[in-house]
């Protein structure tokens, strides 16, 4: 008969826990539900590329492995090595794993906590020992217990925390993708700058030889009385300027090589790239139309929007602190003075009891926390909108650069073609004795400069397409 009241209380307790669980799952989470902040989306790009109403040309598509479109095996190997070994990427991926672990920790708060324990003590109290309440001699106590506690998420504070953690993880994931894109773009940019330096070094070496020959001829003319000392000084200055420019270009190439080494995770001293003085640049054609989804995949835009979502959920967490918390706890076990007789019914004990706790006065701390959460959300929304505006600016800048560099390349190509004709004419006149060798060398210098201007512009155009790909969040491709 003595066990029936106990059984009845246990059943009542189970019903209460089930009802609390139902309330926890069915209750609405306090705080505002998230809606993506509105932003103004233009209908087209100012720099001559349509934005929403058309699809890109599939033949000009750039896939996720966009660097393959430049058709340079050396570049592709470097980018792939960087994506595997770069330490900044490793840091970003570790941060994402940390964010995933934070989600798991937030979800764990929805479930009860169970603990188990087994303790044993042996004590000796003398007759005059202070605090002795039993007969003198050795005393033994053994207990085994199992306890459970659970705080139902009645007001949705935990669910808002999970919502915030998931949004933060998405933001971290976007940032990790951005790091990968940035590293790949940095490798490509540094590589093309290095190849541009290869071309410039080859041109400067040719110019140095020609200027050295002109200086020798001018010095001979001074001895023969057909050149002045000023002519010699001018020729010397021209040669020294080319030598100085050659040193600057060689320094730039070496630094580009060092930068690529670090990007691929190697010490610069153990890394080198073979020179290619006749490198042919491949500038990807920018399609006349771009899909409207492009900016939605930009890592900084996605990260900023998800950060705003996380901040919105934090408002709910702060609001939930205004409501009382319900804690359900239970403990049971056995206690005796001998381990052999521990697990028997007369030695059992148990406790059951809910506790409802609410804060009556906190000096305005909870109100301040809500205001802080709302202010943080407003700040993140403003950052998101600013990021979207900046992303449009980045794309506009890149399109502008590509457009003008294309026109510049066409102009330099025409200049180069005309200088080839002029050089051929000068060489023909030199052959029949109607032009001097110095006239021929000067015309050759002009031709070399025209060719260098063309190659440098093509290199800049190629680098600008890399920047455009980065600003578009990875390139363009047909849906």
Image (cartoon, grey):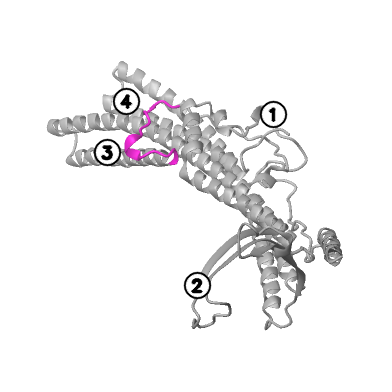
Is the stretch drawn in magenta largely helix, strand or loop? loop
- Disc ID at residue 58: 1
Q: Nearer the viewer, residue 429 or 409?
A: 409
Q: Is residue 396 above or below residue 221?
A: below
Indicate the secondary structure of the residue bearing disc 2. Answer: strand
- Residue drawn at 68 percent across, 41 percent down: 49
In x, y percent, where is residue 62?
62, 32
**Quarter residue 106 falls in:** bottom right
Question: Looking at this rendering, what residue extends furthest in the left direction?
Answer: 223
Kindly report the distance in space between the C-alpha atoms of the residues bearing marks 3 and 1: 47 Å
**Mark 2 and mark 3 residues within 8 Å of each other at the beta carbon:** no
Tell me: 201 left or right of 87: left
Q: Can residue 344 be seen?
A: yes
Q: Is residue 264 above or below residue 112?
A: above
Among the two numbered marks 3 and 1 on one chain, the one whose residue lies closer to the N terminus? 1
- Disc ID at residue 124: 2
Tell me the crowding category of disc 2: few under 14, some 14 to 19, or many 20 or more residues within 10 angstroms, Cα based. Answer: few
**Mark 3 and mark 1 residues within 8 Å of each other at the beta carbon:** no
Indicate the secondary structure of the residue bearing disc 4. Answer: helix
In x, y percent, where is residue 402?
57, 40
Q: Nearer the viewer, residue 303 or 55?
A: 303
Kindly report the distance in space between the C-alpha atoms of the residues bearing marks 4 and 3: 21 Å
Q: Which residue is mark 3?
A: 243
Indicate the secondary structure of the residue bearing disc 1. Answer: helix
Name the front one of labels 4 and 3. 3
Q: Which residues are magenta?
A: 263-279
Among the two numbered marks 2 and 1 on one chain, the one whose residue lies closer to the N terminus? 1
Name the front one of labels 2 and 1. 2
Q: Which residue is mark 4?
A: 440
**Mark 2 and mark 1 residues within 8 Å of each other at the beta carbon:** no
């Amino acid at each position: 008969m003595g066990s029936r009241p106990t059984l009845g209380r246990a059943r009542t307790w189970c019903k209460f826990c089930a009802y609390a669980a139902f309330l926890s799952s069915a209750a609405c989470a306090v705080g505002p539900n998230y809606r993506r902040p509105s932003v103004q989306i233009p209908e087209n790009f100012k720099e001559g590329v349509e934005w929403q109403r058309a699809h890109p040309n599939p033949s000009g598509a750039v896939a996720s492995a966009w660097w393959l479109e430049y058709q340079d095996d050396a570049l592709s190997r470097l980018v792939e090595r960087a994506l595997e070994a770069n330490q900044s990427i490793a840091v970003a991926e570790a941060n994402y794993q940390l964010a995933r672990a934070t989600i798991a920790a937030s979800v764990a708060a929805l479930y009860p906590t169970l603990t188990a324990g087994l303790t044993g003590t042996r004590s000796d109290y003398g007759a005059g020992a202070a605090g002795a309440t039993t007969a003198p001699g050795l005393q033994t106590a053994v207990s085994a217990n199992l306890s459970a506690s659970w705080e139902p998420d009645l007001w949705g504070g935990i669910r808002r925390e999970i919502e915030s953690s998931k949004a933060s993880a998405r933001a971290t994931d976007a940032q990790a993708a951005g790091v990968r894109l940035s590293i790949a773009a940095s490798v490509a940019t540094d590589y093309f700058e290095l190849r541009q330096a290869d071309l410039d070094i080859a041109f400067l070496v040719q110019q140095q030889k020609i200027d050295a020959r002109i200086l020798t001829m001018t010095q001979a003319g001074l001895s023969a009385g057909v050149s002045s000392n000023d002519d010699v000084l001018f020729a010397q200055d021209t040669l020294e300027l080319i030598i100085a420019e050659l040193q600057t270009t060689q320094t730039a190439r070496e630094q580009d090589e060092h930068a690529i080494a670090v990007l691929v995770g190697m010490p610069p001293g153990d890394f080198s790239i073979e020179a290619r003085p006749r490198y042919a640049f491949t500038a990807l054609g920018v399609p006349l139309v771009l899909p409207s989804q492009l900016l939605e995949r930009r890592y900084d835009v996605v990260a900023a929007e998800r950060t705003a979502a996380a901040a919105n959920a934090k408002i709910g967490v702060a609001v939930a602190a205004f409501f009382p918390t319900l804690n359900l706890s239970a403990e049971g076990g056995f206690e005796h003075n001998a381990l052999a007789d521990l697990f028997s019914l007369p030695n059992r004990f148990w406790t059951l009891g809910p506790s409802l706790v609410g804060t009556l006065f906190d000096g305005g701390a909870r109100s301040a926390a809500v205001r802080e959460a709302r202010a943080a959300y407003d700040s993140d929304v403003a950052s998101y909108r600013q990021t979207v505006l900046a992303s449009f600016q980045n794309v506009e800048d890149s399109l502008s650069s590509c457009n003008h560099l294309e026109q510049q390349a066409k102009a330099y190509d025409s200049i180069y073609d005309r200088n080839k004709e002029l050089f051929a004419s000068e060489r023909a006149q030199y052959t029949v004795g109607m032009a001097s060798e110095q006239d021929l060398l000067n015309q050759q210098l002009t031709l070399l400069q025209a060719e260098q201007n063309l190659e440098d512009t093509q290199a800049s155009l190629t680098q600008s397409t890399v920047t455009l790909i980065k600003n578009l969040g990875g390139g363009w491709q047909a849906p």
